[in-house]
Amino acid sequence: MEKIFRVRCLETDKIIGHERLNNNSWEFMDYGESGGWQKGVMEVNAKREQYLGFDDQNGDGIYEGATVVKYEQDRLSDEYQEWLSYVEDDMEHDKTLENKIPVVERIRDTVTMDRMPVYWCENESFGYEGEGLYYPEDFVIVNK
């Protein structure tokens, strides 16, 4: 199985390329060079962030170290209560009320490989208060 890592320069904190382990052989792609895969690893002062194998809500690949956020409708807002009372009366409701409901940040967490394969974020839990497991497609990456 292929493992993919992005390479982030420690001095600039910018992604400068990718490395992959493919059939027990390391290859790298340096964004400043040819752009194609070459044998070996990048000889730079950098950190490697592993690709988790799944994507966020926008289809972007999720890598170790990324900050992810889950947004939801604010169920405490007046707009939500107004929409809810309207929906209870009429199931064929107008979407304009629903679109007025404010969206708030519900969860902000950091992606980690240390807790795989059960959890993929630092603070994720399956606890007694009804918390569920995080689904990557419900999140958006806020730092790439």
Image: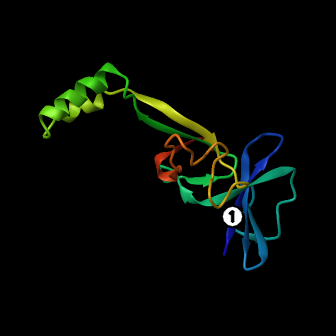
* Residue appearing at x 58%, y 36% in the figure: 108
Q: Residues within 10 Å of mark 1 (few under 14, many from 20)?
A: many
Dividing the picture into quadrants, the one containing residue 123 is: top right
Q: Position of residue 21 (x, y in %)?
A: 74, 71
Q: Which is more toward the observer, 29 or 135?
A: 135
Dividing the picture into quadrants, the one containing residue 52 is: bottom right
Q: Position of residue 140 (x, y in %)?
A: 52, 43
Q: Amino acid at mark 1?
A: Ile
Q: Which is more toward the observer, 124 or 110?
A: 124
* Residue appearing at x 78%, y 76% in the figure: 25
Image quadrant occupied by the N terminus:
bottom right
Mark 1 lies on a secondary structure that is strand
* Residue appearing at x 69%, y 68% in the figure: 3
Q: Give left or right: position of 48 versus 85.
A: right
Image quadrant occupied by the C terminus:
top right
Q: Which is more toward the observer, 56 or 42?
A: 56
Residue sticking out furthest to the front: 128
* Residue appearing at x 15%, y 36% in the figure: 93
Q: Give left or right: position of 37 versus 47.
A: left
Q: Position of residue 37 (x, y in %)?
A: 71, 69
Q: Which residue is mark 1?
A: 4
